[in-house]
Image (tube, rainbow, N blue to C red):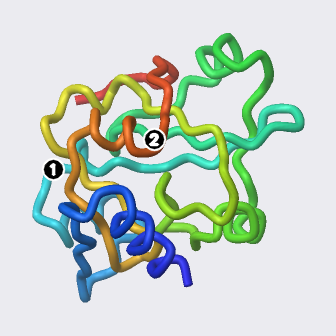
Amino acid sequence: MSLQSVRAFFAEKAPDISVIESPISSATVALAAEAYGVEPGRIAKTLSLRIGERVILIVASGTSRMDNKKVKAQFGGKPKMLGLEEVAEITGHEVGGVCPFGLKSPLPIYCDISLKAFDVVVPAAGSTHSAVRITPERMAELTAAEWVDVCEHRP
């Protein structure tokens, strides 16, 4: 269901972008980098967080780490990762395939500035075997994401 919602999202909003599928699981940054032949930093991982009563998604470079202090300063509360079942229930995507596209219901989306180091990034596309190649700017534009600085940036 999730892969279909992502395909529908792109068919409607960006028909020039196609979902790529891999026989290899891309459920982790390392696996995704191998599956799509890119460096781990180009993998755009989506973090599903609860801050107080709010649920938000932060998309960041695969090699960056969330900085709790920066997140707390930006969003006014302590971040807590969603549980496996909560992620699927809220986003409509399984863990390992979570992305800011084709969500079950609208959520606030934020792109970490770590993505700006790359001309093209590879976020998941709703399943552990699918992704898209997209510029960080286009991803932010298509998902109405706000740019934030909430990660420790690692090469």
Q: Residue 40 location, x and y as percent?
A: 23, 49
Q: Residue 131 location, x and y as percent?
A: 30, 67
Q: Which residue is mark 1?
A: 39
Disc 2 from disc 1: Cα separation:
17 Å
Residue name at image x 13 percent, y 36 percent: 119
Q: Residue 120 location, x and y as percent?
A: 16, 44
- Compared with 107, 53 (above or below) is above
Q: Residue 128 location, x and y as percent?
A: 42, 76
Q: Residues within 10 Å of mark 1 (few under 14, many from 20)?
A: some
Residue extending farthest top: 73
Q: Which residue is mark 2?
A: 59
Residue name at image x 47 percent, y 68 percent: 97
Element at label 1: loop
Of badges 2 and 1, the one in the foreground is 2
Residue 104 lies left or right of residue 44; in this view the side is right
Residue extending farthest right: 53
N-terminal-most mark, 2 or 1:
1
Element at label 2: strand
Residue name at image x 29 percent, y 60 percent: 30
- Quarter of the figure with the N terminus: bottom right
Residue extending farthest bottom: 23
- Quarter of the figure with the C terminus: top left
User: Which three-letter amino acid code belongs to the residue tagged 2?
Assistant: Val
In this view, the residue in front, 47 or 12, is: 12
- Compared with 104, 41 (above or below) is above
User: Which three-letter amino acid code belongs to the residue tagged 1?
Assistant: Glu
Residue name at image x 29 percent, y 57 percent: 14
Q: How many marks?
A: 2
Residue extending farthest front: 12
